[in-house]
Image (cartoon, rainbow, N blue to C red):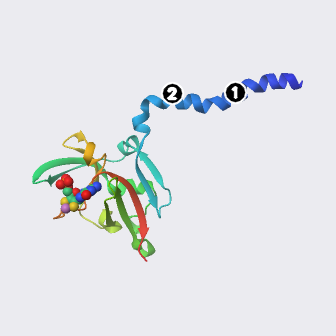
Amino acid sequence: MTKSIRNLCLPGLLTILFCPIVTRGQAAPQKSSDETILSIGGEVERPRKLTSADIAKLPRRTVRATDHGKEAMFEGVPLVEVLRLAGVKFGEELRGRNLQLYLLVGATDGYKAVFALPEIDPAFAYRLILLADKWDGKLLAGEEGRLRIVVTDEKRQARWVRQVITLTIKRAE
Ligand SMILES: Nc1nc2c(c(=O)[nH]1)N[C@H]1C(S)=C(S)[C@@H](COP(=O)(O)O)O[C@H]1N2
Ligand SMILES: [Mo]
């Protein structure tokens, strides 16, 4: 009796044990889309690590902006949509204590810039702040990083953070 149970259980146990390894092995060829390119954290309901595939699923927008005195088309995801994934509150819910929250954008080279949440929220602001992954139809890469903030209608480009890797929600007290 014990032996027959063991005979039955062993293959099942082996399947359970090796299944994750096999699955990981099969996923290996898609490595680049498994890679986290953006982490959202801080005072959010659901901290998230996003791959380029996750970002590709979000609503996309294109803006014409002047970069280095030259007109260019930037394509990407409105920053507000990315933050919504992590449960950041906008619109009617951006009130009271939530108005003390702000976004700190972080880049690979250590550069950081702050945005107040109402600047990002289409319920407050007329302009769009984009998290761009394409420039004139080409994916951003190299020194630009994979993601770049594009702020239309701002006279200086200092908050166009290149090489964006973190979005952190913090609270001003
Ligand atoms: N990651 C990162 N982003 C950055 C900067 C930086 O040093 N690091 N400089 C900012 C400043 S001050 C300006 S004016 C613009 C310059 O953009 P450019 O390098 O495309 O000219 O990028 C902004 N974004
Ligand atoms: Mo600058």
Question: Where's residue 137, x and y in %?
Answer: 21, 40
Image quadrant in which you'd find residue 156: bottom left
Badge 1 crowding class, 10 Å Cα cut-off, few under 14, some 14 to 19, many 20 or more, is few
Question: Where's residue 68, x and y in %?
Answer: 13, 53
Q: How many marks?
A: 2
Q: Residue at coordinates 82% horizontally, 25% vertically from top-left?
A: 6
Query: Relative to residue 165, is residue 63 drawn left or right?
Result: left
Indicate which quadrant contains ligand 2: bottom left
Q: Residue at coordinates 32% horizontally, 66% vertically from top-left?
A: 114
Question: Where's residue 87, x and y in %?
Answer: 46, 58
In the picture, which quadrant includes the N terminus?
Answer: top right
Q: Nearer the viewer, residue 135 or 166?
A: 166
Badge 2 crowding class, 10 Å Cα cut-off, few under 14, some 14 to 19, many 20 or more, is few
Tell me the residue that label 2 is attached to: 26
Q: Of all residues shown, which one is farthest toward the bottom?
A: 173
Mark 1 vs ligand 1: CB below 8 Å: no
Tell me the residue that label 1 is attached to: 14
Secondary structure state at the residue bearing disc 1? helix
Secondary structure state at the residue bearing disc 2? helix
Question: Where's residue 98, x and y in %?
Answer: 43, 71
Q: Residue at coordinates 53% horizontally, 32% vertically from top-left?
A: 24
Amino acid identity at mark 2: Gln
Q: Is residue 150 visible?
A: no
Does 139 appear above or below 3? below
Does 134 appear above or below 93? above
Image quadrant in which you'd find residue 94: bottom left
Query: Relative to residue 31, is residue 109 drawn left or right?
Result: left
